Every structure is written in C-alpha cells, then in structure tokens.
Amino acid sequence: MIYRSKAPLRIGLAGGGTDVSPYCDLYGGTVLNATISLYAYASIEPLDEPTIIIEAIDRNEKVSYPKTDALPIDGQLDLASGVYNRIVREYGNVPSGFKITTYVDAPAGSGLGTSSTLTVAILGAFAEWLKLPLGEYDIAHMAYQVERIELAMAGGKQDQYAATFGGVNLMEFYGNDTVIVNPLRIKDRYMYELGNNLLLYFTATSRLSSTIIEAQSKNVTDKNQNSIEAMHQLKEQARMMKEALLKGKIHDIGAILDYGFRYKKQMAQGISNPLMDEIYETALKAGATGGKITGAGGGGFMMFYCPANTNYSVKQALSRFGGDFRNYQFTEGGLSTWSI
C-alpha cells in the first residue's frame, strides 16, 4: 500500500503578520486567506527493512536512517523528521520502516506557506497510514507545534490552518494558542471575479522569512509603536476585506490591498526592497489598483489586483523584471488523504 496526502498552498489577502507571536498573544490577530490550486504532496510507502528514507524530489535531496525512535534534526529535511519524532512520541513506534516522498508546487521561500503546508501534508500521510484519530484543528495545531516550537522555525500560525481547512477563511488568533477558523461563504461570481482580476507574480527571488519575522517580533517586544500600529491597521484591513468579499464590493479590493501594502512595510525592515517597490509601482502605473507581497516579504510572490481587463497591460509592463505569472484557481478543500 501507498499512503498519500496533499494540502493546498494559500495566498494571504489581508491581516498577514498579525498571526505572529507575540503580537497575536498580546492584542489578538486577524487574517483573511484563501487556498489555491498549488499543493504540497507527501507519500509513505512501508518497507520490509528497518530503514527510514526521506526524499524531497523537488529539491533533489534524500536521506536515509536506521529505524529509530527519534531521527536527528540536522538541517536535512527536518520537517519530515520532526513530524516523525512527534508521531512516535505521541502514538508509539510505527509498524515498519518506510520511505516518505515529498514535493511542493512552489519553491521554498516563495511566500505561499510552503513549509507549513508541507508539514500538514506529511502529518496527513502519517495519519492515513496509522489511522490516527485527528480532526482538522488537531492536525493544524500539531503542525504548528512541530514547526514553530519543536523545530524552532520562526513564523506565524495561519499557514497550518489554511492548509488543513482549505477555502476562504477569516482566522482569529489569541493567547494560549487559541485559534478560531471562520469559513466565509462567498458567492461564486465574486470569487470568479476575484480570480479573474488577481494576478499571482513570482519575482524569481526567494527569501529567508525567519529573519523578517524575528525582526517583526522584536518590534513588538520592544514596544515599537509604529510597528504595532501598523499591525493594528492590518487587522482592520482583514475586516475591510471580509466585508468587500461578502458584499460583492470586489472592485474595492485593489484599494484594500494597497492599504495593507503601505502598512505592512512598516512592520519590520526587509519586508519590501527597492526591486519589489519598483515592481509594485510599475504594476500600478499599468492599471493595477493595488497589490501585496505574499508571506513575510522580502521576495517570493506578489499579487496585483487588475480590474477592467488591465491584467494584460500589467503583465506586459512587468515582463522586463524577469519574473513570471502563475496560473491558479481558488480551492474549497483543504488537506486530502488516501491510500492505494
């Protein structure tokens, strides 16, 4: 048997960064995101020998270990090792050696939540193999704990929940790891229009999000009022985005994205850079009414809202920067698992 899973990547539409501690613990965070048709995949194949093989075929990386209760965390495919270690601690030894194979439809550091989504997919594959009694909140919370606490990878809390639940969600984050996922029932025609007008652009760069996130967290700890006020405004942006989507005020979305872009850059140094600012301003001059940097910032993907059939002119204007546009659709489903 082979046990498989896939989980969707996400684009953050509003409120990104307010899901990062300590801000969300002190003030409460609010994020609005939507999953898209780019995925992280994991497959587990039990082996007849006492060996554990981990292979990330998209990164051309492969490691092998004797079957043991705890795999080393040594910088080599640590997400899979971290999930395995947590599973063994919580549920006991797995029944045999195995090979786990993973790949993701977007590069690491792209701002679409790749590492967290991959963690969810790996957990899903183990849950399918071992028939673990885990609900959506359980998987998302466990993925968060593995990545953020046990592996000490800096980041927020939204990605694990987006990958697990799927769809368009308004998420609220509070102290004591309290998370509330509010699915939004948005009319199909509004989502079709959003998808038609919202371009997803890969800048052909990646970044180490942990550096930016650590600076953002430090600004809160140090009571940097400019940074904290920017995060307050991003929470307000999430409320504005929710209202626009539910009421069908789709052409307000460009301005709402632009509102968030201006404040997000005030959260921490490095969120934007001269190249990304130039790309953004070029898109606006070509007809976009707003946009944002996905994820923590510093590189990866950007999004632009292009109403009234301006998406072609925006694509033409950005062609000189060497990036590329990615086709996608919004998805309703989250983590899926199956065996064959």
Image: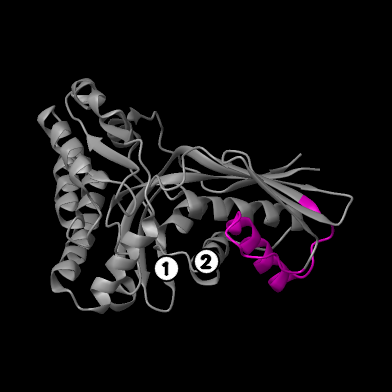
In x, y percent, where is residue 66?
80, 59
Residue 193 appears anywhere in the view:
yes
Residue at horizontal 20 percent and vertical 78 percent from the top: 223
The type of residue carrying mark 1 is: Val
Looking at the rendering, which quadrant does residue 282 occupy?
top left
Residue at horizontal 61 percent and vertical 55 percent from the top: 76
Q: Characterize the local packing of mark 2: few (<14), some (14-19) or many (20 or more) Cα atoms within 10 angstroms.
A: some
The scheme the figure's colours follow is one colour
Q: Nearer the viewer, residue 144 or 150?
A: 150
| 158 left or right, relative to 72 | left
Label disc, if present, on residue 141 of the rendered structure? 2
Question: Disc 2 on helix, strand or loop?
Answer: helix
Q: Which stretch is magenta?
A: 69-98
Residue 27 appears anywhere in the view:
no
Report if the CB atoms under discs 1 and 2 are less than 8 Å apart: yes
Q: Name the residue tied to disc 1.
A: 179
Q: Which of marks 1 and 2 is nearer the N terminus?
A: 2
Give the mark toward the camera: 1 or 2: 2
Q: Which of 73 and 288 is in front in this view?
A: 73
Above or below for 141 versus 168: below
Image quadrant holding the C terminus, namely top right
In x, y percent, where is residue 12?
33, 49
Q: Is residue 272 magenta?
A: no
Looking at the rendering, which quadrant does residue 312 occupy?
top left
The type of residue carrying mark 2 is: His
Image quadrant holding the N terminus, namely top right
Above or below for 193 versus 243: above
Above or below for 218 versus 337: below
In x, y percent, where is residue 166?
47, 48
